[in-house]
Image (spheres, coloured by chain):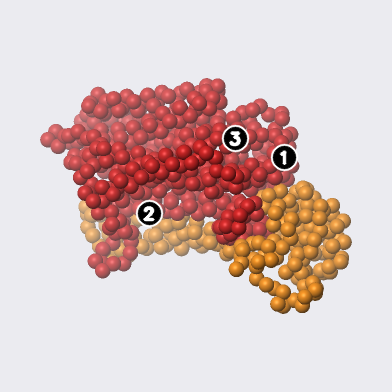
Amino acid sequence: MTTLGHRRSDAIDYDDRIPPGDHSRIYGTMAEFATPDDLLAAAHAARAAGYKKVDAYTPYPMEAVVEALEVPRSKMPLVVLLGGIVGGLTGFFLAYTTQVFIWPWNIGGRPYNSWPAFIVPTFECTILFAALAAVVGMIALNGLPQPYHPVFNVPAFSRRASSDRFFLVIEAVDPKFDRDEARRFLSGLNPSEVSEVEL
Amino acid sequence: MATLDLDRRDLGGMALPPDEVVLAPGHTPGTITDKITAIVHDRTPRWWYVAFGLSFMVLGMFMMAVGWLFWKGVGIWGINIPNAWGFAIINFVWWIGIGHAGTLISAILLLLRQDWRTSINRMAEAMTLGAVACAGMFPILHLGRPWLAYWLLPYPNTMGLWPQFRSPLIFDVFAVSTYATVSLLFWYTGLVPDLGTMRDRAKTRVSRVVYGFLSLGWRGSIRHWNNYESAYLLLAGLATPLVLSVHTVVSFDFSIGIIPGWHSTIFPPYFVAGAIFDGFAMVLTLLLPLRAAFGLQDMITERHLHAMGKVMLATGLIVFYGYLIEIFFAWYSASDYEWFMMQNRIGGPYRWFWAALILCNGLTPQLLWKKSIRANVVALWLISMVINAGMWLERFVIIISSLHREFLPSEWGMYRGTIWDWMTFAGTLGVFMTLMMLFVRFLPMIAMSEMRTLTPGSGSHGAAEAS
């Protein structure tokens, strides 16, 4: 039984793969910061130190951190544009094919292809499909829903990351990652705590 | 502009007059979490049971009225020829209009970077959903055979029938269903990070699992926020033209007809303004008591009251202008039927409805010019109630005064709602209030992740742009 995004104690048991007592495999090293300014400074420092696989966790959107970590531009606009185009075509051709071919009906002598009237369903379908693309696209690009994630194994994270603390994680997949080095590096950035994130 | 606001916020709000503060000084991201999650996670206050119980009783009355309607048919209502449209359409237009303020606050004010929207947008969006749910029921109840409502949708069927895409009634189906869907998506997207907070603050395992499920496992990664902010802004951009289109399409139901008083190009803008006017009134009607009950004066400040009062005043003036220009055009059209309709509207058997309409929507909002009235919670609440009633009267006047005396005197008649009409209408208020009560009890009623960006030193320049 997985509890969504929560402590590992009652989540999937990864211990099968890791011998007892061996904690050689970790997700990464996490530093907790009390203020957004400290996090921002740490994000810049981590990039400057050459770390590539770094993620920050904040209780509200912070564009400055996005820039500091050089996160690529979001693909959302493209996804939404495609959704809108598909929706517009669907709306118009739904009206067009049904009124011109499938069910032609003379309404006060108006042409079968009464396109000005079809603009309303076309418009509504454009918005509908684009909005669905925005939400489904956002969820998919973020890899959600995600029932389990290692960062929640850090107690302080699962208590305060969504409220008033700021976290930076150097992930173990980073080519430059070394446990002791990462801990030493993060400790020098004025964190309130540094901990290792178990898988 | 955004940086200027941010700098002023960094002063801790101390230097600002009370009608400028969007968040009282002394708040940090943590206090915002505590305050708002406590509303849900703490013991249910006693008044909530009373309010929910009353709302649920009214909902029961709605079920009775609708049950009898399904058994007997629309003959139990006051509608007949010439008034084939009555309460059902009045209520539909009224409710759908109320919904518009929610979208305006959440989408249009987001694009206009009005930071005062932040603490009221969640509540207003929930109100939109409740209002659209009530609105959507009326055309279906009015069908006579509501179990065939799905015939309105375009789907391949054995009868080979398709909807008639030139009809504004089909436009309505598309507009209202799109509006309901997009409002739900927008509201839910806004909720996702806050549901993560609710999960992390949950006191019981059940609530942790439920909120965790709904939050999709949100963890606030900066990469997630990057996509999220982009998606949210795009949704706002999509919802903006949508909300303007919905009441425009609703007004087409009237203006495409040839009935005197309906066949007018002024209808779309005048309906949209009326929708926003009424919607803001309903936001205040709900928000002011909740603000007092939950002690939210820190977050819903005097600034919010002033801003909402001013929006009501501005849209009220547009609506009032609409009433006056309708009179002018009825005369200027040189159409006997138009001019008779207007004389009949003002001096005919329904003249008191028109007089009450002008009193409620034309004159009462003028009180909002005065700063002390906008800051007075009781006065503002009473004015908002008067406007709610006034906008219902407006739809009554438009529909009934045009229909009851059409072109031929031989088809003239009078209309009045029956007890079932009134029970259905009052019953939807119960449906609406029940939904609102459930919302404030189980979901965070203020957008926490957005409020945190308003705290001093949040360093959220991006948020200042996007919130």
Say which quarter of the image contains residue A13: bottom right
Tell me the subunit letter for badge 2: B
Vertical side of A179 occupied by B54: above or below = above
- Image mark for residue B174: 2
Q: Nearer the viewer, mark 3 or mark 1?
A: 3
Q: Give left or right: position of A143 versus B105.
A: right
Camera-side residue of B198 and B358: B198
Locate the N terminus of chain B by quadrant.
Answer: top right
Where residue B68 sits in the image (x, y, percent)? 26, 47
Residue farthest left in this picture = B410
Q: Secondary structure at mark 2?
A: helix
User: What colour is chain B?
Assistant: red
Amino acid beneath label 2: Phe
Same chain letter for marks 3 and 2: yes
**Label 3 is placed on what type of residue?**
Gly
Callout 1 amino acid: Pro
Q: Is residue B422 left or right of residue A38?
A: left
- Residue drawn at x 22%, y 49% is B73
Lower sequence index among marks 1 and 2: 2
The residue where tag 3 is placed is B295
Q: Within the image, what quadrant is residue B277 found in?
A: top left
Determine the chain carrying the residue at label 1: B
Colour orange, chain: A
> x and y percent of residue A97 in the render?
32, 65
**Given the image, what chain letter belongs to the residue carrying mark 3?**
B
* Residues at discs 1 and 2 both on one chain: yes
Q: Which residue is mark 1?
A: B456
Q: Residue at x 84, y 54 (%)?
A: A189
Q: Nearer the viewer, residue B320 or A182?
A: A182
